[in-house]
Amino acid sequence: MQRKHKNIWALRDVSLHISAGEIFALLGPNGAGKTTLVRILTTLLRPDSGHARVAGWDVVTNPARVRAATGLAGQYSTVDGMLTGFENLYLIAKLRGMDRRTARRTASELLERFRLTDAGGRVTNTYSGGMRRRLDLAGSLVGSPPLVILDEPTTGLDPKSRLDAWDAVSELAAGGTTILLTTQYLEEADRLADRITVIDHGKVVAAGTSDELKAAAGSRLIIMVAEDHQMPTAIRAAVSASGNSPVVDHRDRRVEMVVTDGRSALTRALSVLEDEGVEALEVGLRRATLDDVFLGLTTARPRPAVTR
Ligand SMILES: Nc1ncnc2c1ncn2[C@@H]1O[C@H](COP(=O)(O)OP(=O)(O)OP(=O)(O)O)[C@@H](O)[C@H]1O
Ligand SMILES: [Mg+2]
C-alpha cells in the first residue's frame, strides 16, 4: 500500500503479512513511516492506494469490524488527564460494549497487571510519563482483542517499566494474541519479535527473523594490536581478508570490517599477521548485531519526492 503526506511518500509500496499469534516488529528510525502504517491498520487514516486487511476485514470498507478486532496503544498517550486511571480504563471498557460490572472488573484487573492499582484513583494528570504509558498499554488490552497494535510501546519508560512491558507483550503472545509493535529499539525487536520488518523512508528495506537479518548482514572480523606501529599490518591483514574497507580505530588500535565468509577471512588475516611477525592482542569474528543490520540499512538518504 502507499500513502503520501503533502509531497512526500510516508509509505511507498509497503507490503507485509502478519500471521496470527506472532509478534511482529516494525523497526525504523524517526520518520520511517511506522505510525502512518499503524494509523492505516487501525482505520485512522486511509491508504492512497493498495489494501489492508485486519482479521480478514478491509480497513476501508469494514472499519468497525477492524476496530473491534484491534487494541491500540498509540505513540502519544491518549489517556484523559481529567479522569482517574480507573475511569480511563472503565470508559474504554464501556465503549467496547461491556456491562458495568464487567467493565469495573476489567479496569481493576488491568490496573493490577500494570502496577497501577495504588494510582488508579488519581487523575492521570498527576501521573508520570511512564505511568501514562503503562495505562495506554493497559487500555489496548481491554476486551482481549485478538490483535494488539503498540506504537513505540516502551519509548520513555524506565528500565524496570520497559521490562514489565516486555513481559506483558510476551505473556499476551503466549496467550495467542497477535502483536504488531513498532520500535526504534533494536534490542526490543531482537528480544520480542518472531519476525522483523525494517522500514526506512516509507519503504521496506529488510524483512526476516532476527537471525536471518543478522546472517544477511555478514560477520565482523576484528583485529586489535598492542602497539601503534603494528596498525598498518593490522589494516593490511583486514583488507587482504576481504577486500572491503575496514573501520579503523587508532585510539583503541582496533580494526573491524564486514566479511561474508568469516572463516576464510579469519585464516587470511591470521596468515598476514604471521607473515609480518605481528602478534595481535585479539583476532576474532563476531556475528552482526541487530545494530549493525539497522545502521547498515538505514543510512541517511534523501527522501524520494512524490513524482505522481
Ligand atoms: N499529518 C502529516 N502531515 C504531513 N506529513 C506527515 C504527517 N504525518 C506524518 N508525516 C510525515 O510522514 C513521514 C512518516 O511519518 P511517521 O509518523 O509515519 O513516521 P514514524 O516512523 O512513526 O516516525 P517516529 O519514529 O518519529 O514516530 C514523516 O516524514 C512525517 O514527517
Ligand atoms: Mg511514529
Image (tube, rainbow, N blue to C red):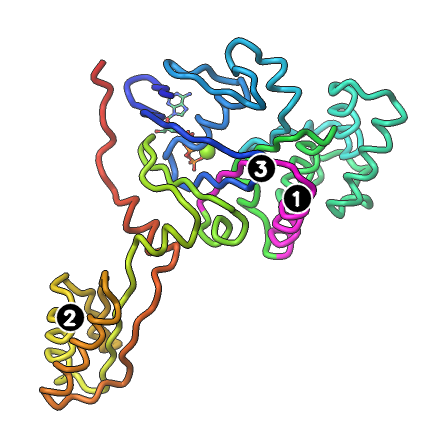
Instruction: Determine which residue is flagged by label 3.
Output: 179
Which region is colored magenta? 160-184
Quadrant of the picture in which ligand 1 is shown: top left
Total numbered circles: 3
Q: Position of residue 295 (x, y in %)?
A: 31, 51
Residue 128 circle label: 1
Task: Indicate whether 304 appears above or below 186.
Answer: above
Q: Looking at the image, which residue is at 14% across and 76% down?
A: 237
Read off the residue under disc 2: 241
Mark 1 or 3: in front is 3
Q: Nearer the viewer, mark 1 or mark 2?
A: 2
Q: Mark 1 or mark 2, which has the lower sequence index?
A: 1
Q: Which mark is residue 249?
A: none
Residue 147 percent across, percent down from the top left: 61, 31
Where's residue 52, x and y in %?
A: 47, 20
Query: Is the C-beta separation of discs 3 and 2 under 8 Å?
Result: no
For the residues labelled 1 and 2, say whether their Cβ atoms are less than 8 Å apart.
no
Q: For numbered disc 1, what is the local secondary structure?
A: loop
Disc 2 residue type (three-letter): Ala
Residue placed at 76% from the left, 30% from the top? 89
Q: Give the quarter of the figure containing the C terminus.
A: top left
